[in-house]
Image (tube, grey):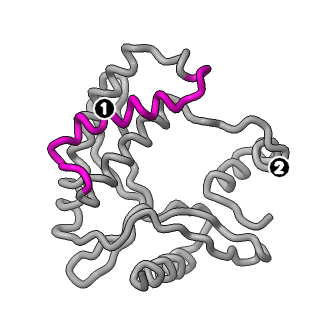
Amino acid sequence: MSHISFSGMKLWNECPYKYKLAYIDKAAKFEGNIYTAFGSAMHTVCEKNLLKEWKQEDSPQNFIDCFFREIERLPEAEKEKIEEKFVEQMIEQGKKLAPEAIPYLKDHFGEFEILSSEENLMESIEGKGKTKFKGFVDLFIKMINITLLTGKLALGAGILGKEPTRWSLISLHYTNISLERSIILIQKALKRTLRS
């Protein structure tokens, strides 16, 4: 095996046989559902806003447009399961959450500068020979003279009539990797980012 992704490691930890079916036997893979459509739409809006490609005040409508595009990409079997009322509830949640991302980051970090986004990682895993960890860093930001890494911007959307929860930042997408190893990975990714 040349590399393993976070998804692959997660699936292996859940069930090695499931991993075999998905990654070795190449059985039908998960292609998304209404929840992944929501997450992908939210991710796109946050990224475009942070990179100033879109206007923050357009976040609610941009979320709606992205969400419908993501729904269109779903397999037909998944589309057939979607209830209109559920889509409406998710739209309301997305419209509330999308404009909160940048204000949350500013509250959390103060003023910051975007250094890079969507950086690829392909790093060796100690004790695993030539196998590498494959992943992505969503965002590098610079705050005062400190460079921070945020791995995955994750949101807990209170779907089905609940109020949206606040944004939470998860530092890295890794499982079972020591803090020291995480710091090394951050340093390597940062060096690549600053070189470009």
The residue positioned farthest toward the right in the image shown: 25
Q: Is residue 112 left or right of residue 75?
A: left
Q: Residues within 10 Å of mark 2 (few under 14, many from 20)?
A: few
Q: Residue at x 39, y 29 (%)?
A: 68
Tell me the kind of residue under disc 1.
Answer: Ile
Q: Residues within 10 Å of mark 1 (few under 14, many from 20)?
A: many
The spot of residue 184 in percent (x, y) is 53, 82
Q: Is residue 167 left or right of residue 38?
A: left
The spot of residue 157 in percent (x, y) is 35, 36
| Camera-nearest residue between 18 and 88 | 88
Instruction: Quadrant for the C terminus, please.
Output: bottom left
What segment is highlighted magenta in the picture? Answer: 53-78
Q: Is residue 1 left or right of residue 196?
A: right
The spot of residue 89 in percent (x, y) is 32, 22
Per the image, label 2 sits on a secondary structure element best described as helix
* Residue 64, disc: 1
Tell me the kind of residue under disc 2.
Answer: Ile
Task: Give the spatial CA distance, label 1 vs label 2.
Answer: 37 Å
Disc tally is 2
| Mark 1 in CB contact with mark 2 (< 8 angstroms) | no
* Among the two numbered marks 1 and 2 on one chain, the one whose residue lies closer to the N terminus: 2
Mark 1 or 2: in front is 1
Per the image, label 1 sits on a secondary structure element best described as helix
Q: Residue at x 76, y 43 (%)?
A: 22
Q: Residue at x 18, y 54 (%)?
A: 103
- Determine whether 71 is above or below 183 in the image: above
The quadrant where residue 9 appears: bottom right
Instruction: Quadrant for the N terminus, please.
Output: bottom right
For disc 2, the marked residue is 24
- Determine whether 195 is above or below 100 in the image: below
